[in-house]
Image (spheres, rainbow, N blue to C red):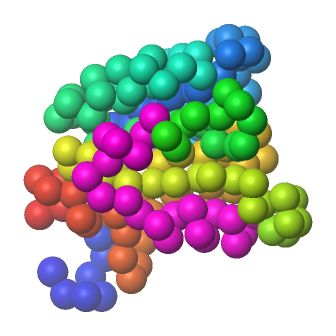
């Protein structure tokens, strides 16, 4: 395939994890938004789960999905702030094979327009584990929209140029 040849869209299988002590299926606006956005973009939603802000519950669910070869991407929402209960980055980091620092950096950069200097309180992060992408977004609806629309929508699209995350997945874009 030449560098200018048109690529076909490759749907990924994506799981959504909401991390919250207060949300349920009815009130999980961020998780529901992400689940809908993933499907509208043409990807397959593997599952959507809500877990409490508990390090081991978070790790248990993520580990199950990371071990599942049919899931290429996991998006989490919630638990990325600075409160006592916000432990998502601490739960995720030990599971990662490689961190993607540019994700959190860029997320905070584009969030300045919406929340100003409060963006420095976001600990959004991303990485890979067992050939699975993990993206951790804050729990607010606006933050999830920003993360999806301004970063993930393009980076999880094989047709996006000059490069994207899909083309780096083994056995996907060969």
Residue positioned 70% across, 72% down in the render:
109
Chief secondary structure of the magenta span?
helix
Q: Residue furthest front?
A: 84
State whether residue 10 appears in this view.
Answer: no
Q: In front: 174, or 121?
A: 121
Residue 80 screen position, x and y as percent: 64, 42
Question: What residue lies at 20% left-to-right and 30% top-to-bottom?
Answer: 67
User: Relative to 143, is 116 on the left or the right?
Assistant: right
Q: How many marks?
A: 0
Q: Is residue 91 visible?
A: yes
Q: Is residue 110 magenta-colored?
A: yes
Identify the image quadrant of the N terminus: bottom left
Q: Residue at (39%, 82%) from the top-left corner?
A: 162
Quadrant location of residue 20?
top right
Q: Quadrant of the C terminus?
A: bottom left
Residue 23 drawn in magenta: no
Residue bounds of the magenta highlight:
91-111
Query: Can you name the residue that lies furthest to the bottom here?
Result: 3
Please determine whether, in this image, residue 28 is positioned above or below residue 170. Answer: above
Q: Is residue 49 above or below residue 67?
A: above
Q: Residue sitting at 35 percent across and 20 percent down?
A: 60
Residue 7 vertical placement versus 156 (above, below): below
Q: Horizontal placement of 137 versus 146: left or right?
A: left
């Amino acid at each position: 395939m030449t560098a200018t040849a048109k690529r076909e869209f490759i749907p990924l299988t994506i799981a959504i994890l909401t991390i919250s002590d207060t949300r349920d299926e009815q009130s999980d606006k961020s998780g529901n938004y992400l689940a809908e956005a993933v499907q509208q973009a043409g990807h397959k939603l593997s599952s959507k789960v809500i877990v409490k802000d508990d390090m081991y519950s978070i790790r248990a669910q993520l580990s199950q999905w990371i071990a599942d070869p049919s899931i290429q991407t996991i998006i989490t929402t919630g638990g990325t702030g600075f409160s006592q209960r916000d432990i998502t980055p601490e739960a995720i980091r030990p599971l990662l094979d490689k961190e993607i620092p540019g994700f959190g950096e860029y997320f905070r950069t584009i969030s300045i327009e919406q929340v100003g200097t409060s963006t420095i309180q976001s600990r959004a992060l991303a990485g890979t584990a067992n050939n699975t992408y993990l993206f951790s977004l804050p729990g607010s609806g606006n933050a999830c929209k920003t993360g999806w629309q301004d970063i993930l929508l393009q980076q999880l699209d094989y047709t996006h140029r000059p490069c994207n995350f899909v083309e780096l997945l083994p056995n996907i874009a060969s």
